Amino acid sequence: MAHDAERADKEAPRKPWLLEYRSSNGFILATVCVAIFTVRVHHNDAPISISFYTGLLVLGAATILFGLAQTSWVLLVSRLLQGTSAAITYTVGLALLVDTVGRDNIGQWMGTALSSSSFGLIVSPLLGGVVYAKAGYMSVFGMAMGLIVVDILMRLCMIEKKHAAKYKPVSTANGFYGTFTNGSTLEHEHSNGSAQHNKPHHNSEHAPLLDNGDEEAPKKKSRMPTILVLLSMPRLLTAIYGIFVNVSILAAFDGVLPLYVKRLFHWNSLNAGLIFMCLAIPALTGPLVGKLSDKVGPRWIAVAGCSLTAPPLILLRLVDHNSAEQKILLCALLVCCGFTLILIVSPVAADLSAVVEEKEKTDPDAFGPGGAYAQAFALFNCAMAAATLFGPVAAGALIERHGWGALTAAMGIFAFSGAIPAFLYTGGWIFAKK
């Protein structure tokens, strides 16, 4: 029996095909990006794998319902399902990303992931307009289902780091690889794991004996619910507000810009969709912005993003009549907005994970053994969802009641409002002692 047990211990589990590639940082990032991009494109038209597949199935059901909807209640149900899918994908995907790469390069990786979100949000009117104009209504949903197929194939191929560790040694120097478990807990368990086998289970230093000889059970420390702890942190709220500002502005463009250029320039759906390329192409610079944020810190990049977005937004009021010069001006200002808006996303998303990690280091019992990354990114996703509702509704109301000029002025002021909390709290309290 002892010989059989020893032989079983020596037998390594069968190594999955292409393990190194399927569990690499790049492939996990690509999978998260495709998932987020797919959710964004569809929006405008537990264990991580189970959660990802649940989001995928919900999204597929929503797409089918949306394409076949003949009544308003079916359309409403489909949109609710799309929102549910987005909540699952963003929360799980971004937490997985942090869990995989850790903090050292999180700005660059988060910038890449959220660039796919911004790109999907912006390019979806273009894709929808082109496909609808050339191939008809149902072809748009055929394209959407094609994205889901790509998404499901990548998710089937992806292997999480914690599972890859069963077949090969995985360093946790820059990552946690516990799937939503805090890094300090894992490091502690790793360093003390071998020692635990050699120690007796009863330790009189840490577990006092009762009168009958039994150990006294350790008392659990009462703590505030994790979600309330997160909401009490100004630095985390600053990150949430930053993404709310960013997505609100993009969603406002999505809601009012096609209608405005149709009315002003008499463009068709294809031309109105193409104008979004001016915002979409700058969104691809997210990885560069994230890398810069990792090097110089997130504060001044986030402040610059909010501050520099205001002038081109306000200057959009100058686009008020039909001429070639006005079309060029509109494109130039939208390109400027695209480059400045992307400065907001990467720093605030990276700072969101940083503030959770720092809180866990200073107060290991603040969130409990499971950590708080998933809940932090759930709040992040709530801010994005609220922004996609607030942006078009507020923009539509302003342009209908007060005109294009009032809308652009309000958007500029709103963008600048994000610079104030970013200056004070992004990267830590500005007046804190070093």
Image (spheres, rainbow, N blue to C red):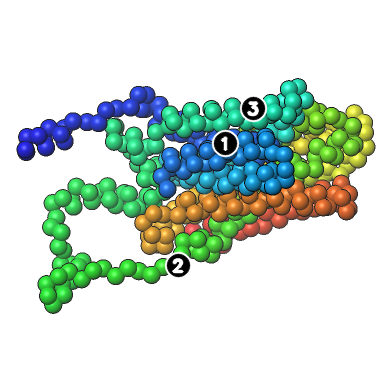
Question: Given this view, does label 3 or label 2 mark the residue nearer the observer?
Answer: 3
Residue 210: % across, % down: 16, 75
Q: Earlier in the sequence, mark 1 or mark 2?
A: 1
Q: Residue at x 76, y 43 (%)?
A: 255
**Residue, disc 3:** 142
Instruction: Identify the element where label 2 is drawn.
Output: loop
- Residue 224 is marked as 2
Residue 385: % across, % down: 63, 49
**Is disc 2 surrounded by few (<14), some (14 to 19) or many (20+) residues within 10 Å?**
few
Which residue type does callout 3 highlight?
Gly
Which residue type does callout 2 highlight?
Met
**Residue, disc 1:** 60
Instruction: Find out whether the residues at labels 1 and 2 contact each other: C-beta distance under 8 Å.
Output: no
Residue 131 vs residue 113, the one in the foreground:
131
In whole angstroms, how far apart are the C-alphas of marks 3 and 1? 11 Å
Q: Earlier in the sequence, mark 3 or mark 1?
A: 1
Q: Quadrant of residue 72?
A: top right
Question: Given this view, does label 1 or label 2 mark the residue nearer the observer?
Answer: 1
Residue 238 vs residue 75, the one in the foreground:
75
**Is disc 1 surrounded by few (<14), some (14 to 19) or many (20+) residues within 10 Å?**
many
**Is disc 3 surrounded by few (<14), some (14 to 19) or many (20+) residues within 10 Å?**
some
Residue 116: % across, % down: 60, 35
Q: Residue furthest front?
A: 70
Question: Can residue 121 be spotted in the picture?
Answer: no
Instruction: Identify the element where label 1 is drawn.
Output: helix
426 over 2 or under it: above or below: below
Q: Residue at x 67, y 44 (%)?
A: 74
- Residue 79 is marked as none
Which residue type does callout 1 highlight?
Gly
- Relative placement, left or right, of 198 versus 151 is left
Instruction: Identify the element where label 3 is drawn.
Output: helix
